[in-house]
Amino acid sequence: LGEKVRGNLVIIGGAEDKKGECKILRKVVELSGGKNSCMVILTTATEHPEEVGREYRRIFERIGVGETNVINIDSRRDAWREDYIKIIKNATCVFFTGGDQLRITSILGGTPVYSILHELYMEGVPIVGTSAGASAMSSPMIVDGNSSDTPRKNTISMAPGLGLLKDVVIDQHFAQRGRIGRLLTAIAQNPYILGIGIDEDTAIIVTPDQCFQVIGSNAVTVLDGRNLSHTNVSELKPNETLALTDVVIHILPNGYGFDLNNRKPLIF
Amino acid sequence: LGEKVRGNLVIIGGAEDKKGECKILRKVVELSGGKNSCMVILTTATEHPEEVGREYRRIFERIGVGETNVINIDSRRDAWREDYIKIIKNATCVFFTGGDQLRITSILGGTPVYSILHELYMEGVPIVGTSAGASAMSSPMIVDGNSSDTPRKNTISMAPGLGLLKDVVIDQHFAQRGRIGRLLTAIAQNPYILGIGIDEDTAIIVTPDQCFQVIGSNAVTVLDGRNLSHTNVSELKPNETLALTDVVIHILPNGYGFDLNNRKPLIF
């Protein structure tokens, strides 16, 4: 509170282009320092760390990153390892792969690596996450939930995320998996929280002034419940259907953005 | 236009319960006059009229309808047949099955059957449609469109519907098929139109005062673009991604409703 955040967050809705123009991943490399960058790829979220790590290393090297280090912290004990900490401290970008967001928070939460991530972010290092790595950025974080369902009280479960972006809840693979119901359920529980649903091959770049810009081939959906006039969420049984009135929705494609402090769409 | 509409519309989002409590279909029978009802089932939308007609006849008879007539008008010529017209004129309820909404409008549009439907509605006869039969109720009508996609200019195609409900566009199988993108695309083209997305096993009952009540096990999504502050729809190429800001969304389950004239949610 009162701290000046200096890094950028790049939050990717999953399935980003890895074969064509690689618009989003090239932007990540640019923000990380291009040829002088030192990228740390954290594979904590995935249960296939070697495969996923190798793929991202190959892509980042192809599109011009300086140095890449794949680090697979897959237990809390690993999150105290001095060799890992040393490498992460030198990063000019930290990249979280997809997988399961609860692995990220349950393995890293409260560890030295967790503290270093926050320090790096304050010092100006971009922190990037795709898919599960995107979900983990915000606090609260959506852990799990049915897609393509009518919003119900039990549609989702939530947990505290990494907290790099606060008072916001992120969802990913958004239009492609029909996830508006679960994001509406998240904001019904506390309309102070802003809902951000990021489509595949689409990302938001959150700058230190707490604005974000959208890049990529699809769109970002923002759900603002500040003027919510009625919800029945507190009265419902778990499987009952949610009522929500007067939620504001914005659909923001490439070239648009959003001011998180003032909750206003931006056109770049 | 000064005319007093007297019938009810029952607009069902498809896949209504036909084996259990049959809450929606029982409500249809009740509105039609119960044991004294004379139900006309129009199978124009489907390419399997015998099978679909037989199924609805059996269900309606089981839940207490007075008389059922299945009429399969599958060409424009049939829509002039005196014997069909006579039966339809005596209906206390007209029920449109699912299938393809464009079959309904292209076969019935401008025919005597079309005029009689409007007359019956004005005289107080309930008109009911499920799935494609639901889409056809409104004008404009969504003909086709990708589900679970980011909204794009070419996400949907529209045509004039039966026009029993005006200045509204209906979509069905709504949450189950992730159709919010296509309904947003529909209202972006003219935000004067209200978007109504009806989930499976869920219906709206539109009463003569132009209010509707929701019944069924899921929810109805209302998209109100009156306060839309920006859209890029007129500038886009067909496959480009839509931008929309400040659309209001309401999620209305069983027991809730909506005042179409004043665009206000209602709690019953």
Image (cartoon, coloured by chain):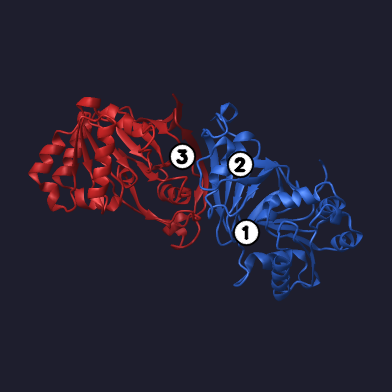
Chain colours: A blue, B red
Numbered tag placed on residue A156 in the rendering: 2
Image location (x, y in percent) of residue B87: 13, 38
Residue that numbered label 3 is attached to: B221
Q: Residues within 10 Å of mark 1 (few under 14, many from 20)?
A: many
Q: CA distance from mark 3 to mark 2?
A: 19 Å
Q: Is residue B122 left or right of residue B257?
A: left
Label 3 is found on which chain of the structure?
A: B
Asked if marks 1 and 3 touch (Cβ < 8 Å), the reply is no
Q: Please name the amino acid that badge 1 sits on.
A: Gly
Examine the rendering and report whether any part of residue B63 can be seen. yes
Q: Residues within 10 Å of mark 2 (few under 14, many from 20)?
A: some
Residue at screen point 12% across, 52% down: B77
Closest to the camera, between mark 3 and mark 2, is 2
Q: Residue furthest right?
A: A82
The reply to the same-chain question for discs 1 and 3 is no
Numbered tag placed on residue A14 in the rendering: 1
Q: Report helix, strand or loop for mark 1.
A: loop
Label 2 is found on which chain of the structure?
A: A
Q: Please name the amino acid that badge 2 sits on.
A: Ile
Q: Residue furthest top?
A: B268
Q: How many marks?
A: 3
Q: CA distance from mark 2 to mark 1?
A: 19 Å
Asked if marks 3 and 2 touch (Cβ < 8 Å), the reply is no
Corner quadrant of residue B71: top left
Earlier-in-chain disc, 2 versus 1: 1
Q: From what the image shows, is residue A215 above or below residue B87?
A: below
